[in-house]
Image: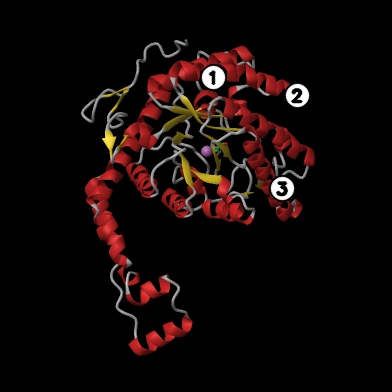
Amino acid sequence: MSNAFKNISKIRYEGSASKNPLAFKHYNPDEIVAGKTMRDHLRFAVVYWHTFRGTGSDPFGAGTMQRPWDDGSNSIKNAQNRVRVAFEFIEKLGAPYYCWHDRDVAPEGKTLSESNKNFDAVAKVLKEEQQRTGIKLLWGTANAFSHPRYAHGASTSCNADVFAYAASQVKKAMEVTHDLGGEGYTFWGGREGYMTLLNTDLKREQEHLAAFLHMAVNYKKKIGFKGQFYIEPKPKEPTKHQYDSDSAACLNFLREHDLLPHFKLNIETNHATLAGHTMQHELEVAGAANALGSIDANTGDELLGWDTDQFPTNIYLTTYTMLSVLRYGGFKTGGVNFDAKVRRESFEPIDLFYAHIGGMDAFARGLKIAAAIRKDGRLAEFVKNRYASWDSGIGAKIESGKVGFKELEAYMLKQGEADANTSGRQEFLENLINEFI
Ligand code: XUL
Ligand code: CO
């Protein structure tokens, strides 16, 4: 067992009056909110990539993170030791889940078989630590975007060999996810897009992406993996345009290629911002299509135009997020996965605790506020009444498909003018939300 955070004991719930920065003020895992424990509602997950592999480097400077347990080498021993540290952290934090990319947990080898061997050697320790702590894998994924071979994309590469390599990598990552009892598997198209259309056969690339996902669906059946597949929308970065750009584009792509029954969406806040949408919009589009699966919880910076992946602390954001999540029935296989990194300037190990505690408390508050708004009922009642004209008369006839243009014209010729509109009451509703915040 690791002892990297020896001065930090298990993070406890102390209530909103506590001034202890290493305690939860709102996340009380066993507390029942809207019929379920907070633990079961929120299903928090810690990401391996930012939290245990993030160095704090940026295009202008080197890494800053102090990680005394890490010898900085690419050895298996270092990777295995890092797993033990990660589980010490996740256990002390009290998050029930974690997520990884294959190459976060184990170093890439010189050949595919060497990489697979490395992965197995580290996955063995992941399994031991999962068994020791009861922490579970929310989802696994393959990093098919960092290595130079993926410069032109993975399944959308112009180079068929690269497609084959990516397929081999995803096959292995699915097997390890399955072996570790993962509850899902995510596809984020890191370079599945283009930098310029001048050199790109867009139609062919999208067909290759669809073929790749069909192969994954077939392989899932073959190995008996029952976890949920997710596709994670993001419009750009690293490419100028990614094919899985937002919820609507993903849903259209999945429908067009007969993949929709096999996938749900993993929606990330900062990706929504990059797409010019709110998180709420992305969640509602996914939820309306019965495809809201999981979320990557973070936030961007309104003044910075890239994927800053900051920890979420904004209560409006978490409230609106949880309102949508609850509206669509809550998380089933997914959860609140902190795809977020501490700032380059927050380089001490203890900052990892502050960041996660803050994010978990912000989501706990969002959950409690959203549940209170739903219990109060005025918001839902307002929306219901706003559409009252569809519940009877001509509205009900339109919705049931009983009338067409001809009947509607006859109806309106008789009536002469539409019934008066009612106010949208945006300000009234914003004030209503503020009653709860
Ligand atoms: C990148 C991103 C990824 C995915 C997993 O912006 O969000 O980390 O979540 O590949
Ligand atoms: Co993400």
Q: What's the residue at 69%, 23% (across, down)?
A: 115
Q: Quick one: label 1 or label 3, which is nearer the N terminus?
A: 1
Q: Is residue 340 visible?
A: yes
Residues marked 3 and 2 touching at CB (< 8 Å): no
Q: Quadrant of residue 57?
A: top right
Disc 1 on helix, strand or loop? helix
323 with respect to 174 (left or right): left
Q: What's the residue at 45%, 23% (across, down)?
A: 135
Q: Which residue is mark 2?
A: 111
Residue type, mark 3 in image: His
Quarter of the image for the C terminus: give it.
top left
Q: Which mark is residue 63?
A: none
- Frontmost of labels 3 and 2 is 3
Q: Which mark is residue 127?
A: 1
Nearest the eye: 313 or 167? 167
Q: Quick one: label 3 or label 2, which is nearer the N terminus?
A: 2
Q: Quadrant of residue 216?
A: top right
Q: Which residue is mark 3?
A: 208
Measure the alpha-carbon separation of dots 3 and 2. 24 Å
Measure the alpha-carbon separation of dots 1 and 3. 34 Å
177 with respect to 16 (left or right): right
Residue type, mark 2 in image: Thr
Nearest the eye: 76 or 287? 287
